[in-house]
Image: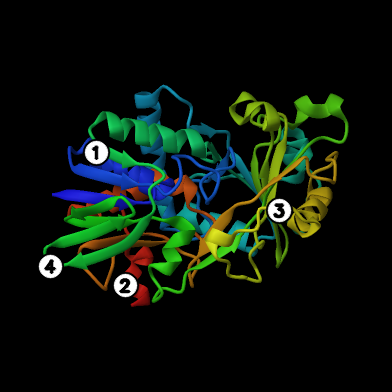
Amino acid sequence: MNVAVVGLGAMGANALWRLAERGVSVVGFEQFQVAHPLGSSHGVTRLFREACLEHPDLTPIAQLSKRLFRELEELSGQELLRITGGVMLGAPDSDVIAGTRAAASAHGLQLEELDAGELAARFPLLAGLAPADVAVLDPGAGVAFPEPTIRAAVVRARALGATVLENTRVLAIEPGEDGVVIRTASGQWLADRVILAQGAWLAAELPWVSLQPIRTPMTWFEPAEPADAADFGLEHLPVFVRQLSESEVLWGHGSVGAAAGPEKGALLKAGVGDIWQERVRIDPDELDRGVKPADWRQVSELLGRAVPGIEPLPARVDPCMVTISPDDQFVVGPSPRHPRVIVGGGDSGHAFKHGPALGEILARFALDEPQLVDTAFIDPARFA
């Protein structure tokens, strides 16, 4: 059995690693350099939550992912996942609170309920609950570090014998009875199975799924008073998701220090949950990498309402993309159009935390191995 992986982002890099760990002959194609900033798997941090509000059955995937993050940390000697706990805030019937509680209840997770006094004492920057709102602490939440994770997965795969072709764009993928032909400008490869994990570029490969690549800027802010910078570290301002109204969701976390590098090390990262609400589809090859006020105006306004002492103008804005599926869940599994093609995409803005587990899931599909977790709700066949 030999397998080709097209795209080495969150899903593809981890699939490459998990296949290589099994001794499988595997080749990975990346149209840019590994851990590049031109797609969806960059930006210093990604939220990690164990009680996954988007779907209860994402929680076992997150738990598998955590185990694999720790395994890759041991292999690489790098910090890839930092667990700090995470605070979810909103009305009891809000998507954030109800979804978090549903996931915890379904899988026996213990959440900690915080009243207004406890919230103010432990996390004063998140204080100021509305009278009807509640706060719950997910002790398994934290931040993952995307670029080091992808590099570590690819380095490990290479050490195990995987072939990695950077700066190599795949021009055609042609599945047939005898295998899958992968064509590039420099030649062609034949594989028994192919895993398609091109992120925003996957939409063009799967028109029957109606994936939508969406431009999603990432924003970092600094304290209004430089002397207060120490108060905005991750230990004081952990991962949070706050639903301020039915249509307003703010997420963020405090500064992660040296892990973010000199430019972002002292900055708070924040974003809005409905940034792609209008769902304007883009061509990922034509992504607008400029910065405009619309990129940060809403997150700045919500941040000003939710976290005191923040400079309203962002210190940094970087472009990014997410790829939305019709039901906001991943599209991961065998293609119903051809048995040799395995699909890994539709991140829908909440996939990186699950990257190592999704890589394992993709590897198991490619090798016809039984799955460790339920994948029915992310099966591509639901769109066939």
Residue at left offset 82%, top offset 35%? 223
Identify the residue position indicated by label 2 in the image.
381
Cβ–Cβ under 8 Å for marks 4 and 2: no
| Residue 120 appears left or right of 59 | right
Q: Mark 3 to mark 1: distance in Å?
A: 38 Å
Secondary structure at numbered mark 3: loop
Circle 1 or circle 2, nearest the eye: 1
Mark 1 vs mark 4, foreground winner is 4
Extreme top residue here? Answer: 77
Asked whether residue 109 is in view, the answer is yes
| Cα distance in 3D space between marks 4 and 2 | 21 Å
How packed mark 3 is, by other alpha carbons closer than 10 Å (few <14, some 14-19, many 20 or more), is few
Q: Of the residues under marks 1 and 2, which one precedes in the sequence? A: 1
For marks 4 and 3, the one nearer the N-term is: 4
Mark toward the viewer: 3 or 2: 3
Give SS at disc 2: helix
Identity, as a three-letter code, of the amino acid under mark 1: Ala
Amino acid type, callout 3: Gly
Foreground mark, 3 or 1, reads: 3
**Measuring 83% from the left and 51% from the top, which residue is drawn there?**
305
In the foreground, 317 or 53: 317
- Residue at image coords 42%, 49%: 31
The residue tagged 1 is 20
Kindly indicate whether the residue at mark 3 contacts the one at mark 4 (C-beta within 8 angstroms).
Answer: no
Q: Tell me: residue 209, above or below residue 14.
A: below
Residue 321, horizontal then vertical, whole percent: 57, 56
Which amino acid does the dot numbered 4 rest on?
Glu
For residue 290, which numbered disc appears in the image?
3
